[in-house]
Image (cartoon, rainbow, N blue to C red):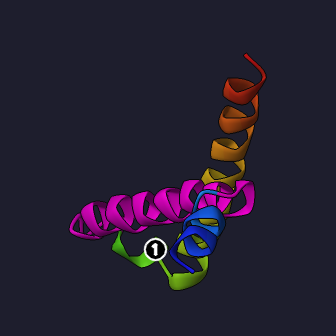
């Protein structure tokens, strides 16, 4: 049972999920920092943060693919 769970958690699909989740956390962190700047606070709606997270997720996917080919 534990071996099956371990196999699932280290599968390629979950590795991709970990990369994308990390980038989403990065987007939320950056938006949190920038929202403290009053002039920029109005530009950081949840839609902008989500879009930024998705863009960073695609960038991380490209980085992961290039690293796995080497």
Task: Relative to 64, say whether 46 is above or below.
Answer: below
For the C terminus, give its image quadrant.
top right
Span highlighted in magenta in the image: 11-40
Is residue 52 at least partly visible in the picture?
A: no
- Main secondary structure of the magenta stretch: helix
Instruction: Report x, y in % for residue 27.
Output: 46, 61
Instruction: Report x, y in % for residue 67.
Output: 67, 25
Picture residue at 57% right of the left edge, 68% below the top: 3
21 in the magenta segment: yes
Q: Residues within 10 Å of mark 1 (few under 14, many from 20)?
A: some
Displayed quadrant of residue 17: bottom right
Front-most of 66 and 57?
A: 66
Displayed quadrant of residue 31: bottom left
Query: Quick check: 17 left or right of 66?
Result: left
Residue at the top extreme? 70
For the N terminus, give its image quadrant.
bottom right
Task: Relative to 70, say whether 50 is above or below.
Answer: below
Front-most of 50 and 36?
A: 50
Picture residue at 48% right of the left edge, 72% below the top: 43
Instruction: Report x, y in % for residue 65.
Output: 76, 34
Picture residue at 55% right of the left edge, 60% below the top: 18
Front-most of 24 and 42?
A: 24
According to the picture, the residue beneath numbered tag 1 turns out to be 44
Instruction: Report x, y in % for residue 48.
Output: 58, 72
Query: Quick check: 25 left or right of 50?
Result: left
Displayed quadrant of residue 57: bottom right
Task: Relative to 30, say whether 48 is above or below.
Answer: below
Element type at mark 1: loop
């Amino acid at each position: 049972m534990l071996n099956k769970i371990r196999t699932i958690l280290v599968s390629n699909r979950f590795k991709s999920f970990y990369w994308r989740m990390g980038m989403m956390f990065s987007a939320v962190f950056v938006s949190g920092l920038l929202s403290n700047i009053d002039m920029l606070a109005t530009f950081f709606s949840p839609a902008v943060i989500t879009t930024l997270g998705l863009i960073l997720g695609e960038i991380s996917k490209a980085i992961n693919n290039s690293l796995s080919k080497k």
